[in-house]
Amino acid sequence: MGSGGARRARGYLVVVALLALTAYGAGDALDVVPGVLTTAGSDDRSAVPRVGAPPTPPPATPRSPAASNVSGPLVVDGTAVLPAADEVARVPGRAALAAAVAGPLRNPALGPSVALVVQDYATGAVLLAIDAARPRVPASTAKVFTAFAIASSADLDARALTSVRSGPAADQITLVAGGDTLLARGRGTPTAIAGHAGLADLADQVARELARSGRPSVRLTLDARAGAGPAYAPGWLTADVRLGLTGPVTNLALAEHSAVPGRPSPADPAEATAQAFRAALVARKITVTGPLTRLRAGRLGAELGRVESAPLGQVLQRALATSDNALTEALARRVAVAQGAAPTFASVTAWIRGRLAAAGVGVNAVRLADASGLSRASTVPAAQLAAVLALARQDAYRSSFGDLIANLPVAGLSGTMTHRFRTAATVAGAGVVRAKTGTLTGVASLAGSLVDADGRLLLFVVMADRTPGPPVGGIDRSRAALDEVVAAVASCGCR
């Protein structure tokens, strides 16, 4: 069998192994809509298969039930599918790599503005850089920057608290928002990320406390002040919001409020959640008088009930897997504000750039208008995006940011990569490419890792931000052309 046939066979074997050995609910969120990406429903259990390879796995945690090590061999449920990067032969050669991608890079569907970076994971050496210093619109690959800022500075096992407290007045109770935007309307599901905590469970607790204290009638107040700020970033289109292509940034929402095309998010998810909680109390024979009010000032009393979200790391992984813009923004604001930033897009993006700079990444050419990449005002060089990916190699970040990068969506299998790398020209990347996708009209990007034909682990970034429309291009053609570039790297030993 020739090297190309062997590579395709290996890709198929990896796909089969992953499907056969890994139990997961593949994310049905597809990166198909300009400027936004849909999210899985509230009963999503875990959309991302976990692939990694520490020789002796560390103890499992709620955040990482099968901890990954991106420097090891590709392992599925303890079975080595591909060898470790440092166990194979030479690093791919620059000239051979350039020759392998030359044809795919000329695809007219990519347009005239294309950047590519390929970097060896084991050594950190940049193997190929094509026009990598010029800033380009990153689309959702900008979420890699946000993921690093969060993972490098926050406790990924931390959980967002939604609580109810007495006060301020004697006949009042207050629903206190704490950053969970994936609440279930009914009961929570402990194994879920979306819907981990449920309003029904919170209402049960509060109803019991009110009955115990002889308070069958109350007024309901909403305290959504924590981290409250602008709902929409500069550059976000009103039409996108109205169509359900993104939702407002909030600190309290039900999972069902996540915007999807054709089903916009409520204009005020926090208030909609409070109204749902009111209905849950009434269903439990608690009389709720008067209209819902917002807490502006006043002291709160004893806690009457609480529910907690899934761990931050799991929620962040979901945001990356489904490319949920509003969820990413909410997480970034929550963590940034806790570390002293103001709850504004400008302050949060300044915090992200500060975290990158503190890790040694040059940020002079990095312009971020939001944390999600939805705004076209954001521009970043491919070299800087690759530099952030490479931070996953460092011991200081390997178990946090490295874990996120190791578990990005898998080509042909999960998340926003479910329906990609399935053609004859791209199947070499199926099962061995993991990447964060980015799509806007006229923009296509991918950033992540792959295992090449020799079993070498590589990091890559490819960006095209002037892709043509139909019939030459269009979203589907441009993304397919991008996949062919990455598949060319994956199928090439390139000695």
Image (cartoon, rainbow, N blue to C red):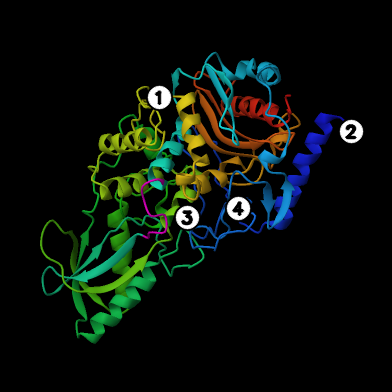
Element marked by disc 1: loop
Alpha-carbon span between mark 4 and mark 1: 31 Å
Q: Dot 4, how many residues are within 10 Å of its Cα: few (below 14), some (14-19), or many (20+)?
A: many
The residue under label 2 is: 1
Q: Which mark is first along the chain, 3 or 1?
A: 3
Magenta extent: 152-159
Say the numbered circle drawn on residue 50.
Answer: 4
Residue labelled with disc 1: 379
Q: Label 1 sits on what residue type?
A: Thr
What is the spatial separation of the Cα atoms under label 3 and label 4, in whole angstroms?
12 Å
Check if mark 2's residue and mark 3's residue have beta carbons within 8 Å.
no
Q: Are marks 1 and 2 in contact (CB under 8 Å)?
A: no
Q: Quadrant of residue 454?
A: top right
The amino acid pointed to by label 4 is Arg
Left or right of 36? Residue 56 is right
Label at residue 132? none
Q: Quadrant of residue 11?
A: top right
Circle 3 is placed at which residue position?
A: 314
